[in-house]
Image (cartoon, grey):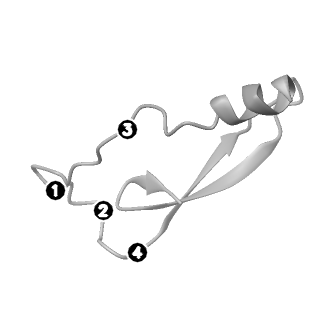
Amino acid sequence: VSGASATVAGCGPGEVERLLPYVVHPEEITPGVATWYATTCGGCSAQCGMWVRTREGKAV
């Protein structure tokens, strides 16, 4: 029972991050059009390559 309660205690909402629109919109970003970037994953020491799709400057 104590393990389950510890697991549930860690499931809180955490810190809320507010996303704000651009004050000055960059010219190279078109709303609604995806942009792809090559990057690497930092999840392990292999550093696998991957593509990240972004829309309005945010990864989706």
Nearer the observer, disc 3 or disc 1?
3
Whole-angstrom CA distance, mark 3 to mark 4, is: 27 Å
Would you name the residue on which mark 4 appears? Answer: 33
Q: Quadrant of the N terminus?
A: top right
Q: Earlier in the sequence, mark 1 or mark 4?
A: 1
**Residue sitting nearer the eye, 37 or 42:** 42
Whole-angstrom CA distance, mark 2 to mark 4, is: 8 Å
Q: Which mark is residue 16?
A: 3
Is residue 48 rendered to the left or right of residue 21? right
Cβ atoms at labels 1 and 2 below 8 Å apart: yes
Cβ atoms at labels 2 and 4 below 8 Å apart: no
Would you name the residue on which mark 2 appears? Answer: 29
Q: Earlier in the sequence, mark 3 or mark 1?
A: 3
Q: Earlier in the sequence, mark 3 or mark 2?
A: 3
Amino acid tagged 3: Val
Cβ atoms at labels 3 and 1 below 8 Å apart: no
